[in-house]
Structure formats: structure tokens, C-alpha cells
Image (tube, rainbow, N blue to C red):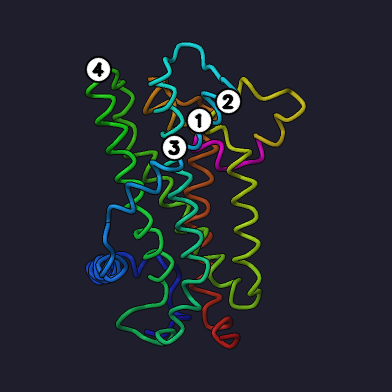
Amino acid sequence: MKPSALNHSAQHLGTHYRLLWRITRNELTTRYAGSIFGLGWSVLTPLMMLAIYAVVYLLIFRVHVPGLSSARYVLFIFSGLVPFLMTSEALSIGVVSVVANKAVLSNTVFPIDLAPAKAVLLSQVTMVVGIAVILLASILTRTLPWTVILLPVLWGLHVLALTGLLWILSLINLVFRDLPNLINLLLMMIMILSPIAYTPDMVPASLKPVLILNPMAYFVVAYQQTLILGRLPGVGNVLVLTVLSVGLFAIGGYFFARAKPVFIDYV
């Protein structure tokens, strides 16, 4: 089938999901081959980031979130930090995924549409490890909230948003090769501007618009409410996340399927 005949890149996810899973698994194995710690790096990296955040906000700035002990505050930070690290890894790999796989641009066995989705799957190792740590700690301290049952829905929306976004960015990167550097700068800004170690209530009124315009903030707040605070995300937050995720996935897949034949000329 010609690429132009495809209406949406999501069709490939349905028809090639076994191939996508197999290639992702093989790449994970190759990534850690010969490494002393292997997959242990997926545990060490978020824990080191958490330690830095905990020291800065808990011991230096002495930030206190009402209703949370110091131990729960650390988990509060972790529940926002892990999704951000997953997002950062997916974007870093996914933006260059089409360029990195340009040899298979016309391959019908492995459609190039799967490359951005593979980047999202690869980043889920960090997410799985981080969420497992949070859930285990909450179970051991008997503080696991009932709202955790909403985690799969929130997680699924996050994956949809990243996949759709990377379908768009990976093609744009073919004609704008400075995009990865720009993304790295934006990620540093978003990390600071996302309420990972503080709550939206702590943000001064003059800076509220910045928080509202930060899409990552909606995910961070929802994860923290679901995993730690035991609250249902607000209706407005749920609406933004749903529209953002489904919209990006729908538009991104359509854009990739339609623009792919044109963008191939820039490789």
C-alpha cells in the first residue's frame, strides 16, 4: 500500500504491534549490553534526580506541603518527576527517530510511522520503574490512595499525547535540524516551570498564566493527585488532558501519514 493511501499512522500500530514490541525489546537489550549496571541505570537515574530535588526543596528551601510528612513529600516530588523524565527521554529519542531510521523510510516491513512510537515505548522503562517505587513505598507505609485506580487512564493519555507530538516533531526535524537543541532548552524551562516540588497554590498570582500555558503541568498535577494526594483531578484538568492527548494523537497521526511522502525528499 502506498503511504499516501494511509489516512492515519495509528493504522500501523494496530497491524504491526508485535513487530514494534519485538524491535523495542531488542533495542533495550542492545542499549544495556556490556553495561555493568544494565537496566539498573533506569533505577539509578530517577533516584539521583529525586535526591537532588529532595535536598534542594526539603533541606535548603524547606518547602512544606500541608498535609504531607517529609517522607510523603519526597514521594510527592517523585510522582511528578518520573513522568517528566519519561517525557524528556521520549522527546530526546523521538524527535530524531525518523532521521535515525531514514534507511527504512520506504520499508513496508517496518513502516517509519513506528519509529516515533518506538521512542515512546523505550521511555516507558523509566516510568515503570518509577511508578513501581512509588506504589511499593505507598503500600509499605499504608498510604496508597484509592485514586490510584485512575493511573492507567492517565498514563494512557500521556502515551497518546507523546506519540502524537512525536509524529509531528520527528518530521519537522527533517527540515529543521536545530529542533533537538531547541527541545532540550524547552525541557529545561518546563522542568523548572512544572509544579514537581511545589503545588499550584504556591505559585504567585502573577506567574499563574505561565503555569496554565505549560501542558506538562497538567500531567504532573494529575499524577500527584492520583498517586499521592488521593484526590480526583479537577474537571478542568481532566478536560485539558483529554483534549490535549486525543487531539495530539489524532492530528499527529494524520499529519505524519499525509506529510511523510513530501518530507522524505528532505532526508
**Distance between mark 1 and mark 4 Cα atoms:** 25 Å
Q: Are marks 2 and 1 in contact (CB under 8 Å)?
A: yes
Left/right placement of residue 12 relative to residue 188 reads left
The kind of secondary structure element at disc 4 is loop
Amino acid at the residue labelled 1: Val
Determine crowd level at label 2: few under 14, some 14-19, many 20+ residues with C-alpha closer than 10 A.
few
Q: Is residue 231 above or below residue 33?
A: above
Sequence-first disc among 2 and 1: 1
Query: What amino acid type is highlighted by mark number 3?
Result: Leu
Element under label 3?
helix
In the drawing, what numbered circle is on residue 142?
A: 4
Provide the residue designation for mark 3.
50
Whole-percent x, y for residue 193 in the image:
63, 38
CA–CA distance between discs 3 and 2? 14 Å
**Does the magenta-highlighted stretch encompass residue 213?**
yes
Query: Dot 1 corresponds to which residue?
Result: 55
Front residue of this view, candidates 190 and 42: 42
Q: What amino acid type is highlighted by mark number 2?
A: Ile
In-image side of 62 versus 28 (left or right) = right
The answer to which of 180 and 208 lies nearer the viewer is 180
> Which residue is labeled 2 in the image?
60
Question: What residue type is disc 4 on?
Answer: Arg
Nearer to us of marks 4 and 3 is 3
